[in-house]
Amino acid sequence: MSKIKPITTKVPTVSSPKIEDYVDKYRLCVKKTAANILELADVVSSACRDLSKLDFNLFRNAIGADKSKDSYIKKLKVIGGKIARFNEISDKLPPNYTTLYALSQLDDDTFTQVLHDELITPAMTSITLASYAYRSTKNVPRAILNFKNLSVTEQSIAFTEIQSVCNKFNIDVKSNFQFALTNKNPILNHSTMTLIEDIKVKNHLETV
């Protein structure tokens, strides 16, 4: 892997003992916050693995993380799957789940490069990892799904099923499938979802 120039954050020097005392207290709170995020991620990730889909949804509702919090739950699940890489650097982690999610998404080689560049600090943000994230994901296989041979109803059902699979395996989905991504999307009830078993899907899959 070629060297990537890191974005560093300059930390000002503190000379006053009184200020330093508050700085130490603040840093301790930051460390505890990062550790708490990892604990939350571990719980959510474990629940996702151990519970049925129905029970996991009940778990989500019980903790106040219904479908409106899909992004938050997804990020915690990804972080939970990569907790091992954070064990030895717990004192350096940022207290932000979005930044920890960005670190979790890096492949092992890129994450090692980030460590080597001493980029991981409590003050870092996900923006700091922009060039590394591109390096980590540019060779990831992509696929195009063509829904042109499906009716509108079949498209809606198929897309809902695809989203479910992608959520299960933490696959990022980028789509211009407008009606399925807006509030205008008709809500599919259980009886509608069962129709998926009777639909002959004719979409074409092309790898890019």
Image (cartoon, rainbow, N blue to C red):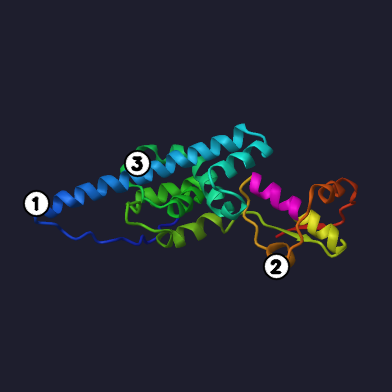
Kindly check if marks 2 and 1 are in contact, taking CB atoms under 8 A apart as contact. Answer: no
In this figure, which residue is indicated by the disc labeled 2? 176
Q: CA distance from mark 3 to mark 1?
A: 25 Å
Instruction: Please state the horizontal and vertical placement of residue 169, each as a whole percent of the image.
Output: 64, 45
Q: Which callout, 3 or 1, points to the residue nearer the camera? A: 1
- Highlighted magenta segment, given as a residue range: 160-168
User: Would you place residue 52 above or below residue 137 in this image?
Assistant: above
Q: Residue at x 59, y 39 (%)?
A: 59
Residue nearest the viewer, comparing 9 with 32: 32
Q: Earlier in the sequence, mark 3 or mark 2?
A: 3
User: Would you place residue 44 above or below residue 14 in this image?
Assistant: above
Amino acid type indicated by mark 3: Ser
Residue 162 colored magenta? yes
Give the number of the disc on residue 17.
1
Q: CA distance from mark 2 to mark 1?
A: 56 Å
Q: Is residue 29 left or right of residue 113?
A: left
* Residue 31 appearing in the image: yes
Residue nearest the viewer, comparing 83 with 198: 198
Amino acid type indicated by mark 2: Asn
Give the number of the disc on residue 90.
3
Q: Could you classify mark 2 by the number of other residues whose Cα lies within 10 Å: few (under 14), some (14-19), or many (20 or more)?
A: few
* Label 3 SS: helix
Instruction: Please state the horizontal and vertical placement of residue 207, each as a whole percent of the image.
Output: 73, 57
Instruction: Please state the horizontal and vertical placement of residue 36, each as a whole percent of the image.
Output: 39, 42
